[in-house]
Structures are given as structure tokens and as C-alpha cells.
Image (cartoon, rainbow, N blue to C red):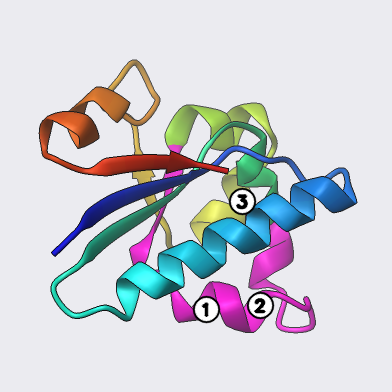
């Protein structure tokens, strides 16, 4: 049994960023599909820019994103800072803000989660 917090920080500007996104989504899917594991998938920083794109049914990674949609949360502060508020609201995603508007990485560590960033 493994608890993992996967944080997507990569923006949506380059091919390398898309690679980090896909690796993060694939990792989250692997944890989500493994009995006994718990995963939190957090879009933080520039990573919040992906929400609007991934919610589009025509996006090439939409299905992969949908496979872990129930595990997704978003940094509240960064959603605003990176212009993703409307997309986050439209998607009905949970916002995390317990550390001055940001997710508390310390809380995940304290709860025994392995923190993995992409």
C-alpha cells in the first residue's frame, strides 16, 4: 500500500512540458488502479494552465486525464495567478489552499505520502 501526492508543475509551453504532464498523469493512473494505493494529483503553479486544455474532449490526453479526474485537485492561488479560475470552476475541481493559498506539501509528507513532482 502506497500513498502518493503527484504534483504537476510543468506549464503548457513546450513539448518537454507536455512530456512531464503525461508522465505525471500516467503515474497517477498507475497508483489509482492499484488496490490499496491512494493518490492525490495536484495541478500547481504553471501546471494549472493544463486544466482548460485537458477538459477539451478533443485534446489528445483528455482520456488519460479523465481516467484520474476523481483524484485531481488544484492550487487555489495558482489557478488565479495563471488564469485558470474559470476552467477549474467549470471542471468542478477541488481547490487546495491550506498553506497561504497553496497546497501544503508538508501536510502530505506528515500524512506519509510520497511526493512526486513533474
Residue 66 is marked as 1
Where is residue 8 shown, x and y percent of the image?
55, 45
Residue occupying image coordinates x 72% and y 74%: 56
Q: Residue most toward the right? A: 14
Q: Tell whether 114 sits left or right of 88.
A: left
Give the residue pinned by disc 2: 62
Q: Nearer the viewer, residue 56 or 44?
A: 44
Give the residue pinned by disc 3: 86
Stretch of the chain drawn in magenta: 51-75
Q: Tell whether 61 sits left or right of 63.
A: right
Could you tell me if the residues under marks 2 and 1 are in contact, i.e. CB atoms within 8 Å? yes
Q: Nearer the viewer, residue 35 or 89?
A: 35
Residue occupying image coordinates x 33% and y 68%: 31
Where is residue 7 shown, x and y percent of the image?
47, 43
Magenta run includes residue 53: yes
Residue occupying image coordinates x 65% and y 55%: 21
For label 3, the crowd category at 10 Å Cα-Cα, with few meaning under 14, some 14 to 19 and many 20 or more, is: few
Q: Tell whether 57 sits left or right of 112.
A: right
Q: Nearer the viewer, mark 1 or mark 3?
A: 1
Which quarter of the picture shows residue 36?
bottom left
Amino acid at each position: 500500500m502506497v500513498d502518493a501526492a503527484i504534483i504537476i508543475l510543468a506549464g503548457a509551453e513546450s513539448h518537454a512540458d507536455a512530456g512531464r504532464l503525461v508522465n505525471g498523469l500516467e503515474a497517477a493512473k498507475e497508483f489509482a488502479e492499484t488496490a490499496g494505493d491512494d493518490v492525490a494529483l495536484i495541478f500547481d503553479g504553471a501546471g494549472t494552465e493544463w486544466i482548460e486544455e485537458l477538459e477539451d474532449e478533443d485534446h489528445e490526453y483528455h482520456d488519460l486525464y479523465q481516467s484520474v479526474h476523481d483524484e485531481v485537485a488544484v492550487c487555489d492561488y495558482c489557478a488565479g495567478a495563471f488564469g485558470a479560475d474559470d476552467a477549474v470552476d467549470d471542471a468542478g475541481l477541488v481547490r487546495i489552499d491550506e498553506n497561504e493559498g497553496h497546497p501544503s506539501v508538508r501536510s502530505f509528507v506528515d500524512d506519509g505520502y510520497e511526493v512526486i513532482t513533474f
